[in-house]
Amino acid sequence: MGAVSRTAEETNRRMLRARDAMDRAYAQPLDVPALARIAHVSPAHFARTFRATFGETPHRYLQRRRVERAMFLLRESDRSVTDICYEVGFGSTGTFSRTFRDIVGRAPRTYRKETTAVNVPTCFTKAWTRPSA
């Protein structure tokens, strides 16, 4: 197994620093130039290297992170979809709904209905699904 070069190790650290910043401040307006400054590289180099390192663009990573947080809020709170949209950092409900659907496979309201139905106590589920004699 080959050792990672010092340059590659430093590049990975820089990309991880930027990704950690996205994880912490996902609801803030983060763009490639701001993330590149965190990683101490040019915006073009950052965008290329981030994608090569993590397999997706910085923008897509940030969107996915926001949608993951929205999924949690949709499951665990009764706040409106609009409130959740803005809380996780989206600028419009249309963009939020489209991005959510692209990543999750269904609309935010549909996701909430389906996951709420899943959170039923086991004893009820067994009673409802028990075959009749």
Image: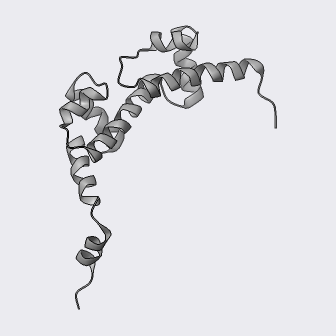
Residue 93 rendering spot, x and y as whole percentages: 20, 28
* Above or below: residue 115 compared with residue 58: below
- The color scheme shown is one colour
Q: Residue at x 35, y 17 (%)?
A: 29
Which quadrant of the figure has residue 94? top left
* Above or below: residue 124 compared with residue 110: below
Along the line of sight, which residue is nearer the eye, 22 or 97?
22
Residue 43 rendering spot, x and y as whole percentages: 51, 10
Return the residue found at the far bottom.
133
Question: What is the quadrant of the C terminus in the image?
Answer: bottom left
Residue 110 rendering spot, x and y as whole percentages: 21, 48
Please give left or right for residue 87 compared with residue 33 in the image.
left
Residue 87 rendering spot, x and y as whole percentages: 27, 28
Please give left or right for residue 109 compared with residue 122 in the image.
left
Please give left or right for residue 87 compared with residue 15 in the image.
left
Report the number of numbered marks: 0
Question: What is the quadrant of the N terminus in the image?
Answer: top right
Which quadrant of the figure has residue 6? top right
